[in-house]
Image (tube, rainbow, N blue to C red):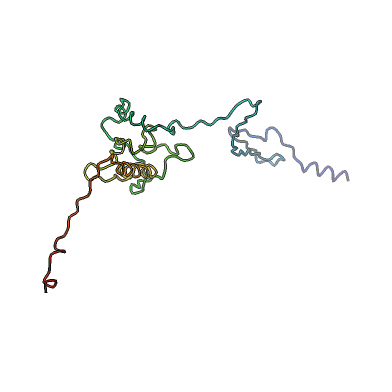
Amino acid sequence: MLRCFRSSISAVRVLQPSSVIHHPGHLQTSSKPSLVTKRYVFTTPKMLIPDTSANSGTQFAEEGDPRLRDIPVEISMKYMESAAYQETYGEAKVWELYRRNYANGRTYQPTRKNCIRGGKIANGNPCPICRDEYLVVDHQNLKLLNQFVSDYSGEILTSKKTGVCQHQWMKIRVELQKAKDKGLLKIDYPFVSYDYDKYRPTKQSIA
């Protein structure tokens, strides 16, 4: 019995301090067998829930993006006439100085659906309308709406040319139609050219 007990003790090796090799950032052991195994630390992201109790030390209040403030259209119209607007854009339109980022050079791709997701700016290069909180798309803000209308044909410029997201482009189309319905914008009806040969009498019709 004593011999078996001694053999079991000799089979177990105790880790010596010299068998541990310390490296920055992680722990490695030597090739000698030991009873100590590697230990890993796993972390899981956890949402911080604000504690509204009276004894709570720190309040976790989420602040909104200042670019998502609700600016009245009257302030936006004054901003279009201000010196700050002239200093920012000058004589150019709000979308002319904007440069769109293309993924892998795919210039044929349409613009993103929306720059705002979950109440926040979801990308680092928002469209010309979403990046400036004082540009409010409204049927009364004619100086802004006219920048998205072609000077030659009177048609609405495409989102690929202006770089605005699909959400803002739809708002521009809706507000432009509202301005036309209320008589705020001049409506130029397209010139229709008729083929009068279709209406001239033929020999068969005379016979």
Quadrant where the C terminus sits is: bottom left
Q: In the image, is 119 to the left or to the right of 17?
A: left
Q: Residue at x 44, y 30 (%)?
A: 66
Q: Position of residue 70 (x, y in %)?
A: 43, 33
Q: Quadrant of residue 204?
A: bottom left
Name the one closer to the observer, 11 or 121: 121
Q: In the image, is 60 to the left or to the right of 37?
A: left
Q: Position of residue 196 (x, y in %)?
A: 14, 61
Q: Position of residue 137 (x, y in %)?
A: 36, 38
Q: Position of residue 115 (x, y in %)?
A: 42, 40
Q: Quadrant of residue 37?
A: top right
Q: Quadrant of residue 103?
A: top left
Q: Residue at x 60, y 35 (%)?
A: 26
Name the one closer to the observer, 197 or 85: 197
Q: Residue at x 39, y 35 (%)?
A: 131
Q: Residue furthest right?
A: 1
Q: In the image, is 207 to the left or to the right of 93?
A: left
